[in-house]
Amino acid sequence: MKKSVLLALAALAFSGATAMAQEVTYEPDCSQGLLLNQNKNNWFLTVQGGTNIMFGHHDIKADLKNRFGFNGALYVGKWVTPTFGFRFGANWIMPKGATTANGDYVKYNKDGKPAEIAGTGYYAEKFMGLGPEFDVMINLTNWWCGYKPNRVYNAVLHGGAGAYWTWGRNMGQKGTNFNWHRAHNTWLFANLGLQNNFRLSSVVDIFVDVQYELFNMTGSAVHDASASLGLNFNFGKSEWNCPVTAVCPTWKYTDAEGDALVAKLNDAENKIANLQQQLDACLRRPTTENKVYDCEGLATVYYPINQYGLSSREKTILKSVAAVMQESGKKYVLTGYADNYTGTDEINAALRENRVNGVKNYLVNCGVNADQLVVKTDNNNLTDLGVKAAPLDRAVTIRLAD
């Protein structure tokens, strides 16, 4: 029995267990990564305000209730990716604490004397700082859990540095008023905070921010902790696009239908095994004067829908084909096919190329000279017997060159 006839019978047996393919759809798949937006998108404006508390060496001498001050900030920023962004703007603080009698920011009573903290030997302190700040921002939720455009909560870690120009408040003439004056001290600071962000809409977010700050105050390190409430206003496009991939839908069956399909598949596998035995016996027979490689059609390799990899059964067949080719030394034409009943033109073109190149590469690996192989694809159906015979059109044919 000729090998081409055996392979055709095997394909027909297997096709009885193959479900008709549905139309391929295209859907966004964020597991493939994300596409970056244009520079004009993902900008935001942040407005926030709250309270702070000082932890300097002298500040702890004051009662806790007298150490709460105020803070506020205004930033402009941009998210470069869903995980990484930056912001820059102005930061304002008005802390309270304790200092020595000759401190730069001693708070005065209405009698014109420094406000001493009873029983401590220290004096109340109050000052104001204003300056620029630059922060790097990392969206921990998108980093650890993956990007979701409609997620309600996002934890955003931010850290940066800046500087403060400072003002103190001293008693005016005759003890009738207080005036803010430049202290001519510039402090450098660094901070680290966590912004707990809640989405209200695609344009507005509300957040609670907790922050730790370390700055250099007249030659010594001072600690500051703050809690703020704020709003983020998003400008331009705020979402990120996912790559679009092809999705091949699968049929859903009842248990009874599934059992029937399993039974058909087992029957088809038994028939294929029987045909394989016949083919192996045919290959083991001694060659005659009318050798196999003189046939116009040497072999045909068949594939499941939307696949181009070689199964172990097909590799066994191709090893035998490779032996025939090496013995003959003749040229052969490999033609790749894909059925035109399912899939798009682009997908089918890729399947034809991948199938025929896969067969060629395997034959070369088996020892066939690459110069013996001519590779091409055919956009037509191999059999053109209709959609029920579509599995016969998903193939690579191996024929003797003219």
Image (cartoon, rainbow, N blue to C red):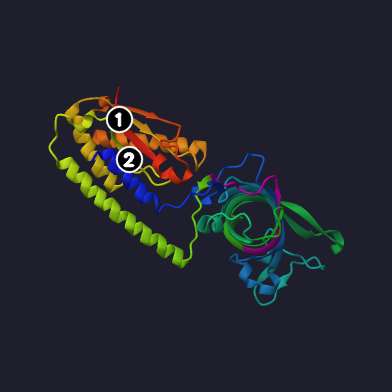
Give the residue at x 29% y 38%: 4
Residue 387 or 370: which is nearer the viewer? 387
Residue 242 within the segment the image draws in magenta: yes
Q: Give the quadrant of the N terminus.
A: top left
Q: Give the quadrant of the C terminus.
A: top left
Query: In the image, is 294 to the left or to the right of 233?
Result: left
Query: In the image, is 52 to the left or to the right of 268?
Result: right
The residue type indicated by label 1 comes to: Arg
User: Please, what secondary structure does the residue beneath circle 1 have?
Assistant: strand
Q: What is the C-alpha distance between the residues marked 2 and 1? A: 12 Å
Picture coordinates of residue 373 (x, y %)?
Answer: 29, 27
Residue that mark 2 sits on:
301
Picture coordinates of residue 265 (x, y %)?
Answer: 36, 57
Q: Residues within 10 Å of mark 2 (few under 14, many from 20)?
A: many
The total number of labels drawn is: 2
Residue that mark 1 sits on:
399
Question: With respect to residue 71, does 90 lie above or below?
Answer: above
Give the residue at x 35% y 46%: 11
Query: In the image, is 362 to the left or to the right of 215?
Result: left
- Tell me the magenta residue range: 225-244
Give the residue at x 61% y 70%: 60
The residue type indicated by label 2 comes to: Val
Mark sitting earlier along the chain (2/1): 2
Task: Tell which residue pokes out farthest to the bottom in this image.
Answer: 119
What number is the disc on residue 219?
A: none
Picture coordinates of residue 375 (x, y %)?
Answer: 34, 28
Question: With respect to residue 11, does 100 lie above or below?
Answer: below
User: Please, what secondary structure does the residue beneath circle 2 have?
Assistant: strand
